[in-house]
Image (spheres, rainbow, N blue to C red):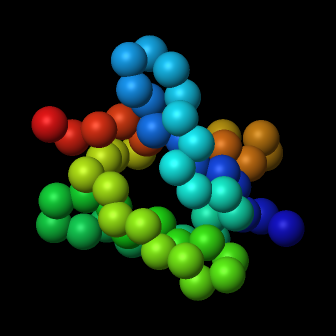
Amino acid sequence: MCEANAYLLKGGKEELVLESVDRIVPQEDGLLLEDIFGKKKILRARIKEMALVDHKILLEEIK
């Protein structure tokens, strides 16, 4: 499988926001994340780093 877990950087720490992310869709003011089960989450964030071999997506908040 090629899905990844998404983490949001908060205060220098990584907080898990959604597991098994399959899609990331840019939105006007952030990102729409969707997991393999169809659960969706919209975040005011941008991608800081993607390490797909490690199945990890690191996001940072947009202020």
Q: Position of residue 25 (x, y in %)?
A: 39, 71
Residue 11 at least partly seen: yes
Q: Residue at x 58, y 42 (%)?
A: 16
Q: Tell whether 63 sits left or right of 46.
A: left
Quarter placement of the N terminus: bottom right
Q: Position of residue 63 (x, y in %)?
A: 14, 37
Q: Tell whether 61 sits left or right of 39.
A: left
Q: Residue at x 29, y 38 (%)?
A: 61
Q: Position of residue 53 (x, y in %)?
A: 78, 45
Task: Tally the numbered discs.
Answer: 0
Tell me if residue 45 comes above or below residue 9 in the rendering. below
Residue 50 at least partly seen: no
> Residue lying furthest right in this view?
1
On the image, which quarter does residue 10 sit in? Answer: top left
Q: Residue at x 77, y 41 (%)?
A: 54
Tell me if residue 31 comes above or below residue 47 in the rendering. below
On the image, which quarter does residue 28 sit in? Answer: bottom left
Q: Position of residue 58 (x, y in %)?
A: 52, 38
Q: Residue at x 46, y 38 (%)?
A: 8
> Residue lying furthest bottom in this view?
38
